[in-house]
Image (tube, rainbow, N blue to C red):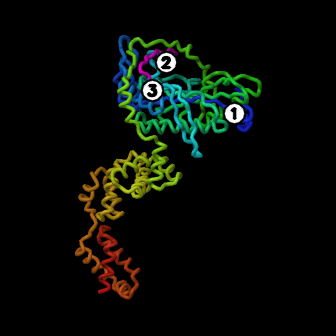
Amino acid sequence: MTAPTLVDYAEVLERFDPVLGLEVHVELNTQTKMFCGCPTAFGAEPNTQVCPVCLGLPGALPVVNRSAVESAIRIGLALNCTIAPWGRFARKNYFYPDMPKNFQTSQYDEPIAVNGYLDVPLDDGSVFRVEIERAHMEEDTGKSLHVGGATGRIHGAEYSLLDYNRAGVPLIEIVTKPITGTGERAPEVARAYVTALRDLLRALGVSDVRMDQGSLRCDANVSLMPKGAAEFGTRTETKNVNSLRSVERAVRYEMTRQAGVLLAGDRIIQETRHFDESTGTTSAGRTKETAEDYRYFPEPDLVPIAPPAEWVEELRVTLPELPWERRRRITAEWGLTELELRDLVNAGALDLIESTVAAGAPAGEARSWWVSYLTQQANTRGVELAGLPITPAQVARVIELVASGDLSNKLARQVVDGVLAGEGEPDEVVAARGLAVVSDDTALLAAVDEALAAQPDIAEKIRGGKVQAAGAIVGAVMKATKGQADAKRVRELVIERCSQ
């Protein structure tokens, strides 16, 4: 196959206007599938989470998952959509090798949510509004594993394996209207939109939005219009792009590839394309079907969806603060720079710190614990920060014990180690390990007198006015008490003893 001729990006922008369309598929985090009671847990043994309904066996009847409908409505509301008062499911007919009933139950001409928008923050602080065409409910397909080929795709494979665990998992597909007016920022806008959508869905709590596990997938439609043209160009659809960076790269590549085709006098073929992560290029898939090719017809085994207006309003009040508005508030309240905030987000620490603050800890101390010692522990264990077996409330309690003088910072780390080891709540670890700070003056004076007697030369220096020499005595007392003495109080007692 001849390598495509790519046009310099600057020349693309001189000759053409890009038009984008982004379709994002979101797996919902319901406990069971869209139309049956099978579990949806990721990573189970192949074909262990199936039943007659999701296997499409004769006589098996589907039932709509109420929680999935609730999530769909909340997503629609968060995207400023109109929620349809009535709608039906349809059968989308296509050759589905990984769908045992050989059709997908989806919403076609009557989606649950329509005509919305999402205001997307860009890197320079500006905002770009992306218009939403629709958000509709459907079910996911199974998963094919092609064995024996060099690329992991069916071409060149020796055989294929099918896992139907994912078949029937609830999906929401969010489709934008044509995105115009982006100019040179088209790739950035595409990435920023998927990023903002991911953050919004995570804040709603409707999905874990793990692109690496396929619970958030983006299909990027790209076309080019010659400058001054009134009609959109022919589009291509790059399927299942699975990282934010790849969304940006795929859009940029398609713009340079399509420009090469058009400037050579050829035409763009409406087709699906595959994105290669290693090369940053796309390759042809199959000719893209139109809606008519799918032969949609109403699903006869499911009743229509008719959410009452009161239910929709009840769900509206559950919507959280928008993630970017929350970040602006936190930046102001905590006195952070944009870079510091971005680092907290990238480290997965922001939610944990905010929850620790909500449990009563000062923001500075909460941030320090999560981004330093606890991050070190997460790296050592090879887990995400949120995967550590310690809660924000427990961290807040450790911070409280330090503030009250019951623990030193060194002892506090030992308490955290105990919590991480499963030894109980912070106070239980303190009691079991005997880690409370020694603050009784009688016990401390005995340790101070012993240290002064052991180092008479240091004692003389302190008596002679060299107060900084007290550090050696304090260190000796801390060692003798296994770090459990209040260092500040020990220093005060050393100076008092030497001034008598």
Name the image quarter holding residue 459: bottom left
Task: Give the mark toward the camera: 3 or 2.
Answer: 2
Where disc 2 sits, the SS reads loop
Alpha-carbon neighbours of circle 2 within 10 Å: few (<14), some, or many (≥20)?
many
In the depicted structure, whether residue 50 falls above or below residue 335? above
Mark earlier in primary sequence (3, 1):
3
Q: Are marks 3 and 1 in contact (CB under 8 Å)?
A: no
Alpha-carbon neighbours of circle 1 within 10 Å: few (<14), some, or many (≥20)?
many
User: What is the magenta range?
Assistant: 84-95
Mark earlier in primary sequence (3, 2):
2
Q: Which mark, residue 256?
A: 1
Q: Which mark, residue 272?
A: none
Alpha-carbon neighbours of circle 3 within 10 Å: few (<14), some, or many (≥20)?
many
Q: Marks 3 and 2, Cα distance to the nearest angstrom?
A: 14 Å
Q: Residue at x 32, y 86 (%)?
A: 499
Task: Give the mark toward the camera: 1 or 2.
Answer: 2
Q: Marks 1 and 2, Cα distance to the nearest angstrom?
A: 33 Å
Residue position for label 2: 108
Residue position for label 3: 171
Q: Is residue 414 magenta?
A: no
Q: Is residue 242 left or right of residue 431?
A: right
Q: Residue at x 44, y 25 (%)?
A: 83
Q: Are marks 1 and 2 in contact (CB under 8 Å)?
A: no
Residue 139 makes an appearance in the image: no
Mark earlier in primary sequence (1, 2):
2
Q: Specify the quadrant that holds the N terminus.
A: top right
Name the image quarter holding residue 63: top left
Task: Give, as a three-letter code, the residue at label 1.
Answer: Thr
Q: Is residue 252 left or right of residue 161?
A: right
Q: Position of residue 214 (x, y in %)?
A: 48, 32
